Amino acid sequence: MDDEEREVQERYEREIRKGGDSGGKGPSNPKEKILLVIAIILGVAVLGLAGALIYVSSHKAHQVEMVTTEKDQLTMQMMELKEQYSELSTTNDTLNKQIDVEREKVDQLIVRIKKTDARNAVMMKQYERELGTLRSIMKHYIVQIDSLNTLNNVLREDAASSKKLAEEKSKQYNELKTTTDEYAKQVSAGSIVRGRGVMLTAINSSGRETDRSSRVNKLKACVNLVENAIAKKGYRSVYIRIKDPEGILMTSDQQKIFECAGEQMIYSATREVDYEGDEIEICVFFGQGTKFVKGVYTVDVYTEECKLGSADLLLR
């Protein structure tokens, strides 16, 4: 019993006592007494009903406030989840498509929550369960993305390591090729047959040497091909170029050309020799029947590989 009901009850008792004390001044008719009691009881009942209505209304308002707060919190959590999904990114196209599907589910759930009455507790619970499911799926994607990123980092490191190794191998190859080329050049240079002891003499008609121009029948140029174990064996040609005292190249009636180290030149005479790697002397003759004048004659001796040397001859 609340304070208002107690106050009504006390007033009723005071009226009863007052009627007895006043010697019959209060309601003396039993009927009147009954009506008075009924009025008091009705008053108490009305006050009690009013109190109950106030309590129910207040409780209901509190419940509405609570479910509205729960709906707002659920909506806020969904918005946070949407933001978290938007931050998920990967280089895997298939995984990106799956994440896009889940993002769409989050957007649809947010729309459904906003349209649902906050007092619909059943739907709110359903939305909470869906929120939990979407969170679990997002965590699964985070694990996948982390694993994929870790794998990508490993692959990038492997690729960088492989690239570095390839660069090192390429550098080693280039160095080896350079060394090999140098060796090849050295071998090639070493395989060239060199000459020494180039001499130019004049021969008379008796086959004897002379220095008198009037007695010269022909000129004789000799050279020694030096020993070379790695040189190519077999026949090779030796060419001579003789210039008269005026520096004019002396040739036969029919000019002939040879090539030495890529350069084409006219030669005075040539002879072929069988070279087997040992030192050998070869002589080439020129000018039989030619008239020789006084002065200095010069001879240059060649093979197709290189120049072997030069020599001068003074005729009186």
Image (spheres, rainbow, N blue to C red):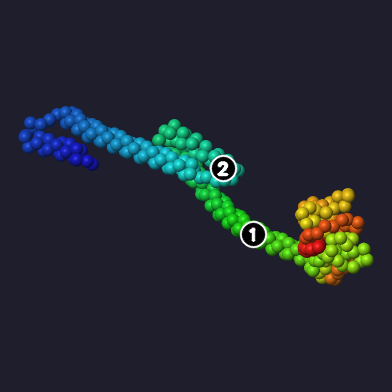
Please identify the quarter of the rendering in which residue 207 is found: bottom right
Give the residue displayed 90% in from the left and 68% down from the top.
208
Quadrant including the C terminus: bottom right
Question: Quick check: 315 left or right of 3?
Answer: right
Mark 1 or 2: in front is 1
Residue closest to the eye, 126 or 270: 270
Please indicate, yes or no, whether residue 170 appears anywhere in the rendered image: yes
Q: Is residue 210 left or right of residue 76?
A: right
For label 2, the residue is 96
Residue under circle 1? 171
Mark closest to the chain's N terminus, 1 or 2: 2
* Quadrant occupied by the N terminus: top left
SS for tag 1? Answer: helix
Which amino acid lies under the numbered mark 2 shown in the image of this protein?
A: Asn
The amino acid marked with disc number 1 is Lys
Taking the spot 84% from the left edge, 63% from the top edge, the residue there is 212
Which residue occupies the foreground of this view, 148 or 59?
148
x%, y% of residue 217?
89, 60
Q: State the residue at coordinates (18%, 30%).
A: 36
Which x, y percent locates residue 172?
A: 66, 62
